[in-house]
Amino acid sequence: MKATELDRVDTRILAVLQEDGRISAVELAERIGLSPTATGERLRRLQKDGVIVGFTARLDPHRVGLGLLVFVEVSLDKTTPDVFERFAEAVQRAPEVLECHMVAGGFDYLVKTRISDMAAYRRFLGDVLLALPGVRETRTYAVMEEVKTDGALPV
């Protein structure tokens, strides 16, 4: 996928939106020094071009009962296109999986999940993760401390 050409104003818009996705169009226009109309046109273009993929609320996972963050290395029994496809389709249906990335290296996928506690993780591991198509082996890494979680891209 080719990167979209972004000028200085576009990158400023993106930086402000990553700080505050609920900013009003008028306030955004004031902060970047454009008219509301010009700012709105740029926003629509950035969305149409797929640079801005959506707006969401960031929740405190501890306050919603999902305080345990776990990363899991997943190795598949075979590395063939059909096994990759079946695994990817099945992991899409697992709501506990926040992110899943195919990686290069000593294992096939890195899965990020949030659950309430270690007992819930044990159930997820046995009932969901190990039941996914092609899973041969997993390695679990429970997070002891979250050091940086803002997730903003350095535009």
Image (cartoon, rainbow, N blue to C red):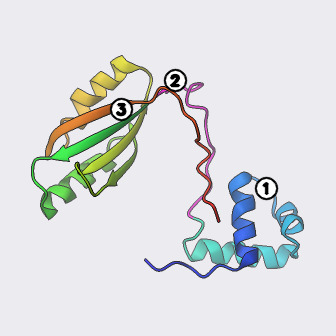
Residue 9 numbered tag: none
Q: Nearer the viewer, residue 142 or 1?
A: 142
Specify the quadrant of the image occupied by residue 12. Answer: bottom right
- Amino acid under disc 3: Tyr
Give the residue at mark 1: 23
> Marks 2/1: CA distance?
28 Å
Mark nearest the camera among 3 and 1 is: 3
Give the residue at mark 2: 65
The quarter of the rendered structure image containing the N terminus is bottom left
- At mark 3, the secondary structure is strand
Q: Residues within 10 Å of mark 3 (few under 14, many from 20)?
A: few
Residue visible at 57% across and 36% down in the picture: 147
Looking at the image, residue 20 sits to the left or right of residue 140; the answer is right
3 in relation to 108, above or below: below
Specify the quadrant of the image occupied by residue 6. Answer: bottom right
Do the residues under discs 2 and 1 have CB atoms within 8 angstroms?
A: no
Residue 32 within the segment the image draws in magenta: no
| Location of residue 52 in the rendering, given as x and y in whole percent from the top left corner | 60, 66
Residue 141 numbered tag: 3
Q: Quick check: can you spot residue 21?
A: no
| Location of residue 148 in the rendering, given as x and y in whole percent from the top left corner | 59, 41
Do the residues under discs 3 and 2 have CB atoms within 8 angstroms?
A: no
| Location of residue 67 in the rendering, given as x and y in whole percent from the top left corner | 50, 25
Looking at the image, residue 92 sits to the left or right of residue 79; the answer is right
Disc on the earlier residue, 3 or 1: 1
Q: Nearer the viewer, residue 96 or 139?
A: 139
131 in relation to 116, above or below: below
Residue visible at 30% across and 55% down in the picture: 102
41 in relation to 24, above or below: below
- At mark 1, the secondary structure is loop
Provide the residue span drawn in magenta: 53-68
Most common SS among magenta residues: loop
